Amino acid sequence: MVPPFKKVETLAVQLGKDEIDLLRSGLAEWGGPAHATDELAVAMGFEDVADLYTQVHRLEEAVSESKPLTAADWKRALVATEVAFVSNVFGSGLDWSTTVGLSDETTIQLLRRLQRKLGSAIATTARGAE
């Protein structure tokens, strides 16, 4: 929760259509094939599972419209996409290419590009500036 009068800065990150589509797809997996526990949701930067499901819809819309996000939101969007892709326990895992329509190879290449582009935004969050 943000204390009163604290300004939370947003960051506009230029993403290509394929990068936007990957984030949208990864976020859309939550509530579908991807599911979480409260502990996992907290580890990904959400308050709990209910917050995860609420926030992924907001994040998916913001990413789709190329809106600026806070550093914390960029982190949540990226981590949620990473877990949805990689985890066969919590995410789509082995079914990713079927549910999303992207090969593992293409997804890895896009994820690496996103990790590089979003690195500074996520580093800001890691230092505690949310």
Image: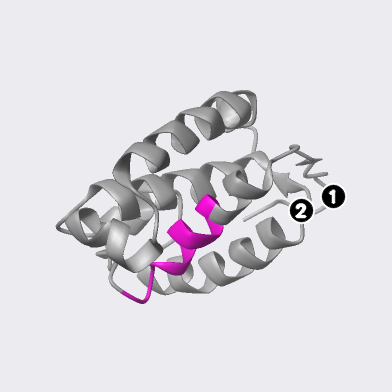
How far across and down, in percent of the image, does residue 97 sit? 30, 57
Q: Secondary structure at mark 2?
A: loop
* Residue 95 in magenta stretch: no
Residue at image location 36% in from the left, 53% down from the top: 42
**Does residue 109 appear anywhere in the picture?**
yes
Residue at image location 49% in from the left, 37% down from the top: 110
Which numbered marker is on residue 66? 2
Q: 83 left or right of 58? A: left
Res 34 → quadrant: bottom left
Q: Which residue is mark 1?
A: 5
Q: Which residues are magenta?
A: 22-32
User: What is the distance, in whole Å, between disc 2 and disc 1 at their CAs?
Assistant: 26 Å
Q: Secondary structure at mark 1?
A: loop
Q: Looking at numbered disc 2 in the image, what kind of residue is underneath it?
A: Ser
Q: Nearer the viewer, mark 2 or mark 1?
A: 2
Q: Main secondary structure of the magenta part?
A: helix
Q: Quadrant of the N terminus?
A: bottom right
